Image (cartoon, helix red, strand yellow):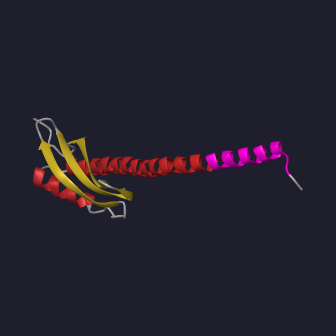
Amino acid sequence: MQRSKQQTVKAHGRRSRSGQTLIEAMFGFVILIPIGLAAVDVVTLMSAMQTNEQWAETAARAAGSCTCENMGSTMAKKSLTRFVPTNIISSIEMEKIKFDEQAGQVTVSTVMQVNMPIPMPLMNRFECRASAIQPLLATPAEQ
């Protein structure tokens, strides 16, 4: 059986459109997949930053319940030992503590090591820093 010229043109036109769709899909995936992977990293980093702020608050509360800077520093470090390392968050440490009896508050700064779940060039490990201020609860009343 012979095809008519019109049927042949339709068949070729359909093939070129499906080929064009395949090429567009391939280029779309080449662009969309890295964007999706980077989005996973960004969400992980935001979550880790929130977690770091919570640990800084916990350490500041522990330090605020003490009467002196040495004891406050010890209690803040002790509160951070309850942290359980994961594949994403490898460590958290107290960076500094400021015990201000005049203002009646303590400031604790923490630093957290965050490993990205999908490592990309120059973006495979981050340090997140957080600070928290809490009132000194154990200060004696002035007379």
| Front-most of residues 76 and 18 | 18
Residue 12 percent coordinates (x, y): 73, 47
Q: Residue furthest right?
A: 1
Asked whether 86 or 74 is in front, the reply is: 86
Q: Please state the total of marks drawn on the protein image.
A: 0
The correct choice, above or below, for 84 with respect to 5 in the image is below
Q: Quadrant of residue 139?
A: top left
Q: Quadrant of the N terminus?
A: bottom right
| Residue at the image point whose x is 45% and y is 47% from the top | 35
Q: Assign the magenta stretch its main secondary structure.
A: helix
User: Residue sitting at 10 percent across and 36 percent down?
Assistant: 102
Instruction: Out of 78 and 88, give the one closest to the viewer.
Output: 88
Residue 131, image x, y percentages: 24, 44
Inspect this view and state whether residue 36 appears: yes
Which residue range is magenta in the image?
3-20
Describe residue 64's horizontal placement relative to residue 10 as left or right.
left
Q: Is residue 59 left or right of residue 84?
A: left
Residue at coordinates 20% horizontally, 54% vertically from top-left?
A: 94
Q: Where does the C terminus fall, quadrant-wise? A: top left
Residue 91 lies, in percent from the top left, at 27, 61
